[in-house]
Amino acid sequence: MQNTLTYIFLFPLLVAFVMLFIPAERWKIFRRLSFAAVAIQVILSVILAINFDKSLNAESWEGMFQFIEQTDWINMSLGSIGSIKIQYFLGVDGISMPLVVLSCFVLLIGVISSWNIQEKAKGYHILYLVLSSSIIGCFISLDFFLFYLCFEFMLLPMFFLIGIWGGKRRSYASIKFFLYTLLGSLFILVVMIGLYLSVVDGDTNTFSLVKMMDGVYDSGSVLDPSSPQLIFGYSARVLAFIFLIIGFGIKLPAVPVHTWLPDAHVEAPTPISVVLAGLLLKVGAYGLLRIAYGIFPDIAIEYAGFVAVLGVISILYGGMNALAQRDLKRMVAYSSVSHMGFVLVGLASLTAVGFSGSLFHMVSHGLISPALFLIAGVIYDRTGNRQMENFSGLASRMPIYTFFMAIFFFAGLGLPGLSGFVGELMVLMGAFGSNELSLWIGMLAILGIAISAAYFLWTIQRMFYGKYFVRESEWESRMFDLTAREKLMLIPLVILVIALGIYPRLLLDYSNETIEFFMKQISQFTQ
């Protein structure tokens, strides 16, 4: 297993570099190379998952990570000012391992979805592979600087992938996406610098997330919890936690910093919507879990109610907006805002079942939401239109398409036996069992599930049942059922959604020990 994480992380970049020397007119070779690169990522991630020790337990965060790769990267002396030490530090635990496998799998689905892209194919696939490496890097980096570098690098390929290959308003959507997420990154940057100046490894400051989570602070430093410093009358640790909530909340996204998401989804090409919904939103949730809650558990307890309210507002506001949409893709985009609110509620519960529910919901949504965008993309590819009122009775013409749509819609609304139910149930159990949250939080979250049932069932009734109808006569010849390539993308997603719904231990066995250790860390501040 030596250097396997490096291969998963950097191999797509190597392939992207090779693509630079291939003539642009040979567009078919680019999709084949992209497929091969991401397929190798999938194989290596599965090998890692098979060899992952699910029973590993330790006394500190340093002992909880596996497949560690650590070496000095930048070690620069600044004379009397001091020095900067940055490490190439990779590793996975029970939280990040499932997200790495999910990322590789969804990225492969995205490559298959990109199969018909011929316009500027060279640039598209190079950017896609850079995006692939950046996403994986976020989930395996244990050095804050390396994490931040990957977090920032996601912005550039996504900006161009939306801005060049997107819809009519692609420039507006890509610029809005870039500005929002760049603003969030600046908040995270401030916290990263503060932590570097406060956390030590031996006698030097460090960007190590492991040391930060283990609380190895320089005595008297600005973020030292034993002697908290004030900035403009507020605790530096409180400000740092709030900055992280804002920074990662934009990426999640949480209301009210969510407005970039519907525009980005609507204008992005289908493969990029798949990656955006399936993975980029999970990077925001992972950042909250790993960094905000992992490094500032004392402040997380103090602000549990605030985070829970943000989650409930996202659930209800996103759901009501989804209910009001007439564009199928925009409806799915707002449903993502709503469903990611459950992640916040689970984290705010500060319970083992709530944390496990948040992680499970992240993975479940990472399977369901890409499928929903693929389903929306099928209609758009055939007609160039996504307005719900332009279609009716599609089940009679596209029965296989309707079958897949029904499974993923029911998974999204939380039908028992499918993965969406398990994640939401665990989050609700955490909310109702939490000592930090009011019962109203759980009750309002349940209302959000009812709203999701309303907009999904309303869409099914309006578009797929009743008398067959399409708005334009020229669409008639294009309303054929799923192609082999479209089935190839959807069948694995169906299998995983059902498998996780029936046997949640496929995921929970990986995360249980890590979540249990997380709870021990938090319990030190609740006694």
Image (spheres, helix red, strand yellow):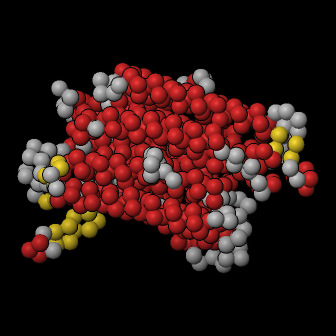
Q: Quadrant of residue 311?
A: top left
Decide which of 65, 394 is in the foreground and name it: 394
Tell me if 452 is positioned left or right of 295 in this view.
right
Whether residue 191 is situated above or below residue 322 in the rendered picture: below
- Residue depicted at x 72% and y 68%: 118
Q: Is residue 189 left or right of residue 251?
A: left
| Percent position of residue 360, x then y | 47, 34
Q: Is residue 273 above or below residue 459?
A: below
* Image spot of residue 323 (x, y percent): 63, 39
Q: Is residue 59 visible?
A: yes
Q: As displayed, is residue 34 above or below residue 398?
A: below
For the image, the number of numbered tags is 0
Question: Along the line of sight, which residue is nearer the eye, 303 or 109?
Answer: 303
From the image, which quarter does the C terminus lie in? Answer: top left
Q: Nearer the viewer, residue 336 or 420?
A: 336
List x then y, in percent, for residue 109: 63, 50
Query: Residue at coordinates 51% horizontally, 61% vertically from top-left?
Result: 177
Give the residue at x 36% y 39%. 307
Q: Residue 154 versus residue 22: which sits nearer the camera?
A: 154
Residue at point 56%, 72% (across, down)? 18
Q: Position of residue 94 (x, y in %)?
A: 39, 37
Q: Is there any visible trace of residue 45 in the rendered image?
A: no
